Image (cartoon, coloured by chain):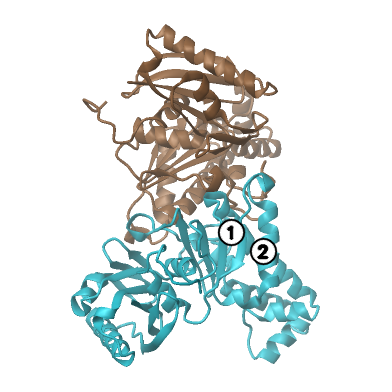
Chain colours: A brown, B cyan
Amino acid sequence: MYYIGIDIGGTTIKAGIVSKYAEILGTGSIPTIADEKCDQIITGIVKLCSKLIHDSHLFVSDIYGIGIGIPGTIDEKSGTIVYSNNLAIENIPIVERLKKHTHIPVLIGNDANCAAVGERIFGNARGNDNIIFITLGTGIGTGIIQDGKLLTGRCGAGAEGGHMVISCDGERCTCGRKGCWEAYASATALIRMTKKAIEKNPNGKLAAVAKEEGKVSGRTAFKAEKIGDGDATNIVNDYIRYIAEGIINLINIFRPEKVLIGGGMSNEGDHFIERIERIVMKESYGGERNPRVIVTKAGLLNNAGILGAASLCIPSDIKRDEEF
Amino acid sequence: MYYIGIDIGGTTIKAGIVSKYAEILGTGSIPTIADEKCDQIITGIVKLCSKLIHDSHLFVSDIYGIGIGIPGTIDEKSGTIVYSNNLAIENIPIVERLKKHTHIPVLIGNDANCAAVGERIFGNARGNDNIIFITLGTGIGTGIIQDGKLLTGRCGAGAEGGHMVISCDGERCTCGRKGCWEAYASATALIRMTKKAIEKNPNGKLAAVAKEEGKVSGRTAFKAEKIGDGDATNIVNDYIRYIAEGIINLINIFRPEKVLIGGGMSNEGDHFIERIERIVMKESYGGERNPRVIVTKAGLLNNAGILGAASLCIPSDIKRDEEF
């Protein structure tokens, strides 16, 4: 019983064959060509799947499903990519097309939604029916599972928690609004804050760390904070507070069991997560009278995109001979 | 086939017998005594129900259910009032106690949740499975229905959209956080903004309107705007923008069919709702590529609390001989 997970990104389409124990039998990739016609993308994916099945010494009949994760608005019910800014495609009935070519059941989801399902099947939310997954990277993606069901909104146009304003009339967001959570708590936002501080104090420790690194990254302020730089401490405190504000907003609406943090920024480690959780515990509505929400790092790291996409096809109550 | 709706408020407990056509056969009320022991509150409610049934010439067997709406955190599953700030009560298994005394099925819900269900059964959201109800009054309450199911969050501690921060480090909210939507878009917030403007310009038209009214209310700025006061226009524009910001946040997460606006402020009329909808349409994520969300006034006005509470007991697909 195997599944194929396909992770369509802005530059690469990655695919892998996955077992129900999260073992990866083989992976492969092809470049994403943004201007490519839909037919070519689909042909590319079909060839990639065939090669993976062949190289893993499997038959098509061994594959129980193909799951696809893609950034953008996805209508899961009709299996259509409504639109994806990264890929410059609109209204593609990808599920129907892929099924026709592969004769395998196909499911599709927004990438953050896939990651949430992946955490529930393979990661740090096994056994949890109510979770929020947050990816802190270039932008912010959210995947929300309630009573075991993925929240997608009508026609897949929901679960865009990153585009929740937390600072009215604040920083301009890529979506056109001002003050979105993404404009304050993504890695991109942290880099903006770090650059601004360096401009103000070009001879400080923060600037020195950036110089040593060769560029300003999402790690710069965290590194400078560790060597006692005051500017960096302020930036990191603000950044953690912004992350917490959005998480608390979502907790006050959904009150899940767990909030899982993934994406590049989650690599800042346990202390980073603990600092977020401290604010979340203190400021969530109702305080200690309401059930505690655990804030934790996402469990899937390498191949998270492939595992998340594949997990779309795996029933959450699937029987496994042993826990893994 | 009749239902009893009980609307527990900070000062009065109102009850009414309701038909499936939203006809109200009779109503009654008793004062809410905040310090009263739970037993006395329950005895009072039982007596009120008995009197209503008797006065309407019905039998207990005619009543298919009692629905209770109450401000606060309600664990619907166990039928417990977890806590209610207005009533100073905690952990009351009210459903079990009322069932024991009345021999009628009892359901309970947070008042904004009841109002959402009421709109779906009796009001402006009939036939809609995905709605968000917002009450703009002293505070902000939200009731969210997704795929026909009320969102309550774990142990009823969710759906607190009013306590979503829209202005980080902004105005202090009653919940302890700074910058909650409630602190910007409730009637209380509008009054605060109006008072501030009057302080700055005590001889302006806005101050004159307030003087004429005898106090500053949620209507003052709207009245002064109508007679061309610039300060009032600024306040009303800001206020409408704040309302819209919170609604857009919720739309980006849930993408419902309709957003219904109730509470005292909804009496400002159609133009008020249209001004909100204009911003919402323009700034919701994905713009016109995503399905439009209708913003409309709530349909239930008089006895909304009783109808909302009663509707908790009424199946949404109940057969009615004719549409009402």
Dividing the picture into quarters, in which one does residue B17 lie? bottom left
**Residue at which label 1 appears:** B247
Q: Residue at x 70, y 36 (%)?
A: A199
The subunit letter for the residue under badge 1 reads B
The x, y position of residue A166, in whole percent, is 58, 52
Amino acid tagged 1: Ile
Q: Residue at x 70, y 53 (%)?
A: B282
Q: Are dots 2 and 1 in contact, CB under 8 Å? A: yes
Category of crowding for the residue at label 2, using alpha-carbon neighbours closer than 10 angstroms: few (below 14), some (14–19), many (at least 20)? many
The x, y position of residue B144, in whole percent, is 47, 59
Q: Is residue A258 above or below residue A308?
A: below
Q: Is residue A234 visible?
A: no
**Residue at which label 2 appears:** B276
The x, y position of residue B78, in whole percent, is 26, 62
Report how far apart the C-alphas of labels 2 and 1 lie in the structure. Answer: 9 Å
- Considering the numbered disc 2 on the image, is that residue within a helix, a strand or a loop? helix
